[in-house]
Image: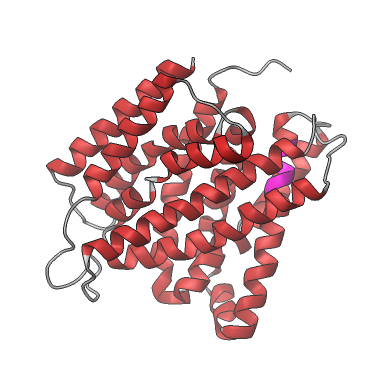
Amino acid sequence: MIVPGSLWVACTVAAAAGQTLRNAMQHSLIGTVGTAGATHVRFLYGLPFACVFLVVVAATGAIRDPQMGPAFWAWLALGALTQVLATAMMLVLMQQRSFVVSTAYIKTEPVQIALYGFVFLGDRLGLQAIAGVLVATAGVVLMSWKPAPAGGNAQGGRSEPAWRAALLGIATGSMFSMSVVGYRGAVLALGDDPFYGRATLALVLALVLQVALLSLYLRLREPGRLTALVRAWKPSLLAGFLGASASQCWFLAFSLQTAAAVRTVGLVEVVFAALISRRVFAQRSGLRDWGGIGMVVAGVALLLAGTF
């Protein structure tokens, strides 16, 4: 089938918007179900919606002969496990710093993805696209380079040194980077079925693995959290839908374009996070934040100009 060259961009922007809203909802659930429970929300309540997506896609005949060999399962396990760890680390970070700054720290990932993608998948970017990745990432760093609020974090908890939050944010970005590379590797390893069939099948199997893993962990270590998750089904259901929709769009984009390019365009999430931070959490962004956002937008534009 003929795929429009800009389709991956539309999928990426939609994924970034949905992910920002889902992150905000997970963030607000921490007080009710804890960090592990809030981490599990996106997987447990996202799986039913992803299964619906799979049924619809399968009805179109897009899943014909998936090649689910050892390479596919290895890539999928890498993506699924590192995503669980990264999500938990992200929620811890959001308790230490503001929502928008936490998002900015994590979004240092495109440079790491470009490296991992080149080493493990052979993904290559042109010089102009590489420049776009660097400019956009520099914008994120500019937003992040600020001391923690005096007397505590943005949520009123205990104060954390800025360098510790920075290291946690970069480590979280690294985990997300490995997850992205794992998922792109899994989608590519599935064979020659239509891209949307491979993307949707990989998403559902990843969620099954993640739900099984986290449910077992919570059952053994924090059994009350599963009960709390069931009781918090109303906000969790919306978070699950947003998470599944965002993940579907990410997987579609990964099946069409290099992981580094996708995640660099995905940095528009910082713009969405700034809006959410201001309107929902009443956290204002300063001149440094808006300067960083400008660099992110410029870097994304540079990457797209070098891609098309």
> Would residue 37 be counted in the magenta stretch?
no
Percent x, y of residue 144: 25, 50
Identify the residue shown where x is 67% and y is 76%: 216
Task: Look at the picture and state if 145 lies above or below 250.
Answer: below
Q: If the image is split into quadrants, where does the N terminus sit?
A: top right
Q: Which residues are magenta?
A: 198-203
Percent x, y of residue 188: 71, 36
Quarter of image, res 215 = bottom right
Residue at the front extreme?
119
Percent x, y of residue 123: 58, 30
Task: Name the foreground residue: 302 vs 33.
Answer: 302
How are the residues colored? secondary structure
Task: Name the foreground residue: 36 vs 306.
Answer: 306
> Would residue 201 be counted in the magenta stretch?
yes
Quarter of image, res 287 = top left
Identify the residue shown where x is 62% and y is 77%: 217
Task: Name the foreground residue: 223 vs 118.
Answer: 118
Judge from the rendering whether residue 114 lies leftward or rightward of residue 245; answer left or right: left
Task: Name the foreground residue: 177 vs 263.
Answer: 177
Prevailing secondary structure of the magenta residues: helix
Percent x, y of residue 129: 42, 23
Identify the residue shown where x is 45% and y is 72%: 35
Judge from the rendering whether residue 113 lies leftward or rightward of residue 192; answer left or right: left
Judge from the rendering whether residue 266 lies leftward or rightward of residue 256; answer left or right: left
Quarter of image, res 230 = bottom right
